[in-house]
Image (cartoon, grey):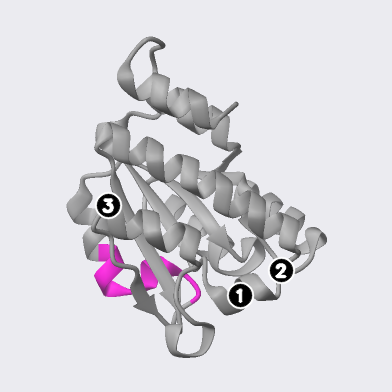
Amino acid sequence: MERLVASSTTLLVVDVQEKLAAAMPPSMVEELVKNAGILLETADALGMRVLATEQYPKGLGPTVAGVATKLAAMSVTPMPKMAFDACSELTLSRALADSGAKSVVVVGMEAHVCVFQTARELVKRGYATYVVADAVASRREENRRIGLSLCERAGAIVTVTETVAFDLLEHAGTGAFKAISKLLR
């Protein structure tokens, strides 16, 4: 397994939307939003490419405020989709190919549906795929757990926010390290 390198890694935020979030356990959503925020700030500090999706936004609403604000500050507009696998959407597939990414870090909802199907397809397409366990959610913990297991069985690496952030940061003592390490305390 290779180290994550900011210049060849894309952060993909999958369907962190208001109506989906309302159906999730509040503590799980809170953890997802917090950790997705840390990874967005890490991506911003390191100049990483960030992509985001929204599943049927007309029905499931926009991205939750805490994530939407960070995306907007980075000039990232979530791409609408209808397919559960985000890679099936041509706009996202092209954006990902254009990013030059070798690795994709995935956060979002729901772990056992869109996150799993997207991770499975990313692996199939040859991307080193990292699914961040403490930044994904499902309506039930059992579904989240099984979704993470399915991601791993499909070839994705299941990891956590701190591991991803410190792998990308690589060194202590930098400005980015100082900024991000404060968020991880």
Residue 112 versus residue 185: which sits nearer the camera? 185
- Classify mark 1: helix, strand or loop: helix
Single out the residue that lies furthest toward the bottom.
59
Query: Where residue 37 appears, x then y in whole percent?
Result: 48, 47
**Residue drawn where x is 34% and y is 24% of the image:** 176
Give amino acid for label 3: Met
- Classify mark 2: helix, strand or loop: loop
- Classify mark 3: helix, strand or loop: loop
**Residue drawn where x is 40% and y is 20% of the image:** 177
Give amino acid for label 1: Leu
Is residue 122 shown left or right of residue 100?
right
Do the residues under discs 2 and 1 have CB atoms within 8 angstroms? yes
Where is residue 75, by image quadrant?
bottom left
* Few, some or many residues within 10 Å of mark 1 (<14, 14–19, 20+): many
CA–CA distance between discs 2 and 3?
Answer: 26 Å
Residue 124 versus residue 105: which sits nearer the camera? 105
Please provide the residue range marked out in magenta: 84-93
Q: Which residue is mark 3?
A: 74
CA–CA distance between discs 2 and 1?
Answer: 7 Å
Query: Where residue 24 appears, x then y in whole percent?
Result: 71, 68
Magenta: main secondary structure: helix
Q: Which residue is mark 2?
A: 24
Mark 1 or mark 3, which is nearer the start of the sequence?
Answer: 1
Where is residue 150, by image quadrant?
bottom right
Q: Which residue is mark 1?
A: 20
CA–CA distance between discs 3 and 1?
Answer: 23 Å
